[in-house]
Amino acid sequence: MRRERARGTVMSRRDQRSSELLRNLPRGISPVHACACVCTLVAVLGCERASGRYDHADRPEPAPQIVGEVPKIDDDGASRSVTMSADAAAECGRGTGRNPDGECVGLGLLELAGVQQVQIPAGEFVMGDIPSTYDARLTRETPAVRKSGQPPHYARVESFWIDLHEVSRGAYAECVSAGECSPAVCPEGAPDPVAELSQEIAAMYPQTCVTHEQAANYCSVHGGRLPTEAEWEYASRGPDARFYPWGNEIMDELPRGLYPVGRMRDDMSYFGILGMGTNAVEWVADRYDPDAGLRSFLTGEFREPAGPVATTRAAWEKALACGDPAAKGCEADEAARERFVVKVSRAGARRASRARLPEHPPEASLEGWAEIAEHPNLGFRCAADLTPGRDTPLRVPAATAVIPLTRSEGTLELFGGVAEAVTMSEAQRFCELLSVGPEETALTDWRLPTQAEVERIADVFRGPGPFWTQDGPIVQDDGTAYPTADAPWVALDVDDAESAALLARCVRGSAGAAE
């Protein structure tokens, strides 16, 4: 159990010197690529910045803490939340939660071995992602779900604990030394990202090159578990539906790369969690479901067991296991096919990675993502359930951001989600199974639109497609490789409606009344 006082709370002089070296690195340059500036003091003194572009990086770093002045909590305390002053409690803003009596208390930090944990208050939030376009032309060639985070939808999580930053190499090395964790090994041909750094500096970096099993085992050994996808995303974006952990705008001073854990202080989420947007991409507990974003709106399964997504995936997995999808006497077993969710910098985005690289690893996954099993940039952090009778459940005091699940256009109502890589019959079933909103007031009776309806609501339908309609497939086409948003919708010929893999978007309402 991670119950002893965290190491490194009081830094040695050597630790302080190392920290000073790291602070003076330009923020746009990953220390991995600037090892000449960090390996030795002599090397640092020999480094010179060419301009003042990164002078803002030299400001003193604050002590590790979440929003506000919140004291740390030792694990032997009677309560693991912090009562606030009257003024702070009256404001009840970020960094706070309401207890069962409605009182506003601080979230606090719990000191564990190698990391601090923050209690995240229970709440509802907007989960998921909004694609910039719905372009399925590649999907026709290789049926796969590429926009698995859509549509945005409401999700709820209960109060839990989560690590303030990723598990560091130093913390993981201690687990290996104790015989409780297996060593992390980068795949053959993949360079260790901190190989050229001193052992002291490297220990501050996130532990990467771990399998999903290794990450889950580490958390279990230390009294926790991997966070669920919903928990990770909620801790990242909070109740206000931010696009990135720090807000809704890209910040040039927060470049993607590997940094010492907790280093990028501006990369702070709504709840004060660090490194969710700039450092290693992270494992979460959930097995990957490509249609996870749509599940809460469906009353059943719309895909055929032998539909284009399933058959393409089976052939792909066989090729990875056997080297040839036509190989005789060789099949990919279920364990080799199993994939888990990986979370990246954009809060609602999601990717998939398998537990280990296959026998014949590809350069990219079927969806076009990098194959990142055991990758030098793939790390993790841990979460934990509240301790019954000791931890007080909290709820977030802020209101949840409001998002539309549907859009009204005249007498038509348009659902916000899109089914990818579906045949005509799968598209029809997808619409029939849609149920949007609370059960007692759910919107049902969805259907595929007609081509005329798509043309009438073209400004919001979003393409270029191709999409299924009641009249057959249509696509936006203006004669260029990348049609503009106002390109005309035209009919598309397909050889077989039960093998073509296109998109489906549903409407409800009277077509006749809309004329």
Image (cartoon, rainbow, N blue to C red):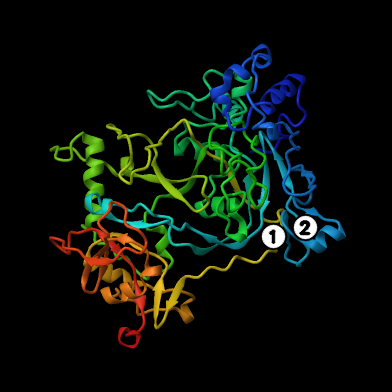
| Element at label 1 | loop
Q: Residue furthest bottom?
A: 513
The alpha-carbon separation of the residues under discs 2 and 1 comes to: 9 Å
- Count of marks placed on residues: 2
Q: Residue furthest right?
A: 86
Where on the picture, by quarter, is residue 133?
bottom left
Residue drawn at x 44%, y 26% as measured from the top left: 186
Q: Is residue 149 left or right of residue 33?
A: left
Residue sitting nearer the eye, 28 or 282: 28
Q: Is residue 323 left or right of residue 17?
A: left
> Mark 1 is on which residue type?
Leu
> Mark 2 is on which residue type?
Val
Residue drawn at x 57%, y 44% as measured from the top left: 276
Residue 207 on image: x %, y %: 54, 31
Q: Which residue is mark 2?
A: 105
- Image quadrant where one finds the C terminus: bottom left
On residue 288, which mark appears? none
Where on the picture, by quarter, is residue 297?
bottom left
Residue 298 on image: x %, y %: 38, 69
Q: Is residue 224 left or right of residue 343?
A: right
Q: Earlier in the sequence, mark 2 or mark 1?
A: 2
- Image quadrant where one finds the N terminus: top right
Q: Are marks 2 and 1 in contact (CB under 8 Å)?
A: yes
| Element at label 2 | strand
- Residue 158, relative to residue 349: is it above or below? below
Residue drawn at x 72%, y 29% as measured from the top left: 8
Residue 466 on image: x %, y %: 27, 61
- Residue 395, relative to residue 193: is it above or below? below
Mark 1 surroundings: few (<14), some (14-19) or many (≥20) residues within 10 A:
many
On residue 394, which mark appears? 1
